[in-house]
């Protein structure tokens, strides 16, 4: 193992509406500091606070930043990127608890496979991450399936990944951000590595529930008219998308960026099955939206 760990920057998103969220933030931070025997210069912690009126105090090792920009999942991650310096960056929700040696386990896999750049800890409480599904007899698994090989509440990317993909797409402010992250890794043929001995527990989504209580998700009729669902989508029972503007907007964003979901699904299946497609020029072609549109016409898939 490394005599000295490479520097890790941990970016944690927060919306400290009340004491309950503050306690959750504190629990997350305390577990992070206790999870490893950090030495000077190995850890940098940036708390991205969305509540401009928040006055809560944290451990002196935590740097608090309250951006002037409107909150967006990817927007805040990009701001965090610009304001940290670690060789690796952990992008985290505030409703997680870091388990002992989670970072050491990732670095152990990295040392054995230097070309790996993107890592995911797991949460054994999730159905597709149990010991039966992901036996710890293997140190890692490679895959791009959401909530099986990847969970957006905590993932670690080497900084040089952004030299390849550019920045996070700020069109995604929350919903479908995780799907966009995974499709981006597929597009650039970058393996997502689930590390079985790196564990982070995900707690209940307290902040999301509070935001849901304050939101008005009903979609105005003019938006339905402007971005209608297709006949096929309605036949599949997707009218429920009209009931919540957040899911509806996320779905439309995916169509705008990646193309028809049926083509994307088929391309994903091919990409997972044939490793020779994991060559960047080929994968970039496969996930090009123009190619998606061409294939949908070729296979007579209606938009």
Image (tube, helix red, strand yellow):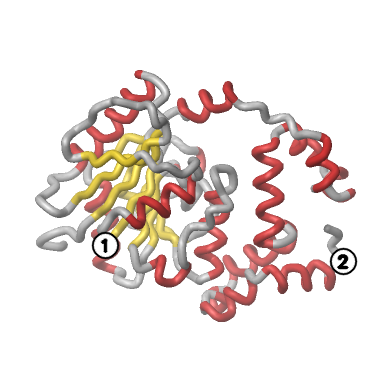
- The numbered mark, 1 or 2, whose residue comes first in the sequence reads 1
Mark sitting on residue 300: 2
Mark sitting on residue 25: none
| Label 2: how many Cα within 10 Å (few below 14, some 14–19, many 20+) | few
- Residue 203 left/right relative to 231: left
- Residue 204 screen position, x and y as percent: 45, 28
Residue 242, image quadrant: top right
From the viewer's side, name the closer residue of 213 and 291: 213
Split into 4 quadrants, where in the image is the N terminus? Answer: bottom left
- Residue 209 screen position, x and y as percent: 53, 25
Give the residue at x 29% y 71%.
Answer: 114
Residue at numbered disc 1? 87
Say above or below: 227 vs 115. Answer: above
- Residue 136 screen position, x and y as percent: 35, 50
Look at the numbered disc 2 and give the secondary structure of its residue. Answer: loop
- Residue 217 screen position, x and y as percent: 68, 30
Give the residue at x 58% y 23%.
Answer: 214
Say above or below: 294 vs 106. Answer: below
| Label 1: how many Cα within 10 Å (few below 14, some 14–19, many 20+) | some
Closer to the observer: label 1 or label 2? 1
- Residue 293 left/right relative to 33: right
Split into 4 quadrants, where in the image is the C terminus? Answer: bottom right
Say above or below: 96 vs 250. Answer: above
């Amino acid at each position: 193992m490394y005599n000295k760990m490479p520097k890790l920057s941990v970016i944690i998103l927060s919306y400290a509406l009340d004491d309950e969220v503050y306690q959750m933030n504190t629990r997350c931070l305390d577990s992070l500091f206790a999870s490893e025997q950090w030495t000077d210069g190995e850890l940098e912690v940036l708390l991205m606070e969305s509540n401009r009126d928040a006055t809560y105090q944290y451990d002196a090792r935590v740097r608090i930043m309250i951006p002037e920009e409107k909150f967006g999942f990817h927007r805040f991650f990009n701001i965090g990127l610009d304001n940290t310096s670690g060789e690796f960056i952990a992008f985290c929700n505030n409703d997680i608890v870091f388990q002992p040696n989670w970072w050491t386990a990732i670095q152990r896999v990295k040392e054995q496979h230097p070309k790996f750049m993107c890592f995911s800890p797991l949460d054994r409480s999730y159905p597709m991450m149990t010991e039966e599904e992901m036996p710890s007899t293997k140190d890692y698994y490679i895959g791009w399936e959401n909530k099986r090989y990847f969970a957006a509440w905590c993932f670690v990317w080497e900084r040089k990944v952004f030299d390849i993909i550019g920045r996070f797409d700020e069109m995604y402010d929350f919903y479908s951000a995780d799907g966009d992250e995974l499709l981006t890794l597929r597009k650039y043929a970058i393996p997502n590595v689930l590390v079985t001995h790196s564990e982070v527990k995900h707690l209940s989504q307290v902040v999301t529930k509070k935001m849901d209580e304050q939101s008005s998700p009903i979609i105005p009729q003019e938006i339905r008219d402007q971005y209608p669902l297709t006949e096929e989508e309605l036949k599949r029972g997707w009218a429920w998308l009209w009931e919540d503007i957040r899911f509806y907007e996320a779905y439309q964003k995916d169509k705008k960026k990646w193309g028809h979901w049926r083509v994307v699904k088929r391309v994903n299946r091919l990409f997972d099955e044939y490793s020779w497609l994991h060559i960047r020029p080929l994968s970039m072609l496969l996930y090009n939206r123009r190619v998606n549109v061409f294939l949908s016409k070729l296979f007579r898939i209606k938009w």
